[in-house]
Amino acid sequence: MAAETRLPSASQWVGFIGIFLLLMGLYGAGRMLHISTRGVPYPERGVFPDTILLPQNSTLVLRESECDSYPQVYYDYSPDGKQTPRPATQEELDAQQQQTLRCVNGFNEDRAKQRQYDKNQSTFLIFVGAGLLLSRRFL
């Protein structure tokens, strides 16, 4: 008697893929809930790891601490060409502070976009996974 090998049916494959997608969506939703309850800044790269199904941009990720400007030295120039260091004027300090604020606001905007993208991705994966699981009986 030869052992009969049984190949998985289409219903079993659809069920496996449905469970996988459903678990990925629940994982993303769970991580978003965990981050929001901890009160930490949202990750700039999102909550999903880089996978074949969910590729991320592999661009250089900057840090918010890089928004702090480097100390600048301001100079007064005399008519004979000499430079003498001087303290910054209020206008120069305000411009430096606005530049730092714009940089931080850019990070916050990127985080908000990534949070919305992750919400959409989690919802999509949950619905597709659940739909595949529910459609198994029709195969």
Image (tube, rainbow, N blue to C red):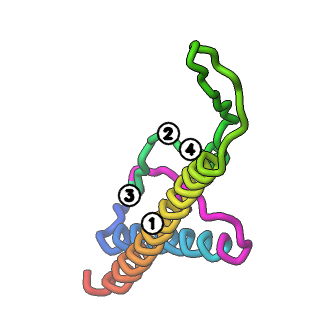
Please tell me which of labels 1 and 3 falls first in the chain: 3
Please tell me which of labels 4 and 3 falls first in the chain: 3
Query: What main secondary structure does the magenta stretch of the protein show?
Result: loop
The secondary element bearing badge 3 is classed as: loop
| Residue shown at 59% from the left, 50% from the top | 91
Question: Gap between marks 2 and 4, in whole Å?
Answer: 6 Å
Question: Gap between marks 3 and 2, in whole Å?
Answer: 49 Å
Amino acid beneath label 1: Lys
| Residue shown at 56% from the left, 44% from the top | 62
Residue with the mark numbered 1? 113
Amino acid beneath label 3: Thr
Tell me where residue 22 appears, x and y as whole percent: 47, 74
The secondary element bearing badge 4 is classed as: loop
Disc sitting over residue 5 in the figure: 3
Q: Is residue 4 magenta?
A: no
Q: Is residue 46 magenta?
A: yes
Residue with the mark numbered 4? 62
Please tell me which of labels 4 and 1 falls first in the chain: 4
- Quadrant of the frame with the C terminus: bottom left
- Circles 4 and 1 in contact, beta carbons < 8 Å: no
Question: Gap between marks 2 and 1, in whole Å?
Answer: 17 Å
The secondary element bearing badge 1 is classed as: helix
**Label 2 packing within 10 angstroms: few (<14), some (14-19), many (20+):** few
Q: Nearer the viewer, residue 41 or 124?
A: 41
Residue 30, placed above or below residue 92: below
In this rendering, which labeled residue sits more in front, label 3 or label 2? 2
| Residue shown at 52% from the left, 56% from the top | 102
* Left or right of 91, for residue 5: left
Q: Nearer the viewer, residue 16 or 53?
A: 53
Residue with the mark numbered 2? 60
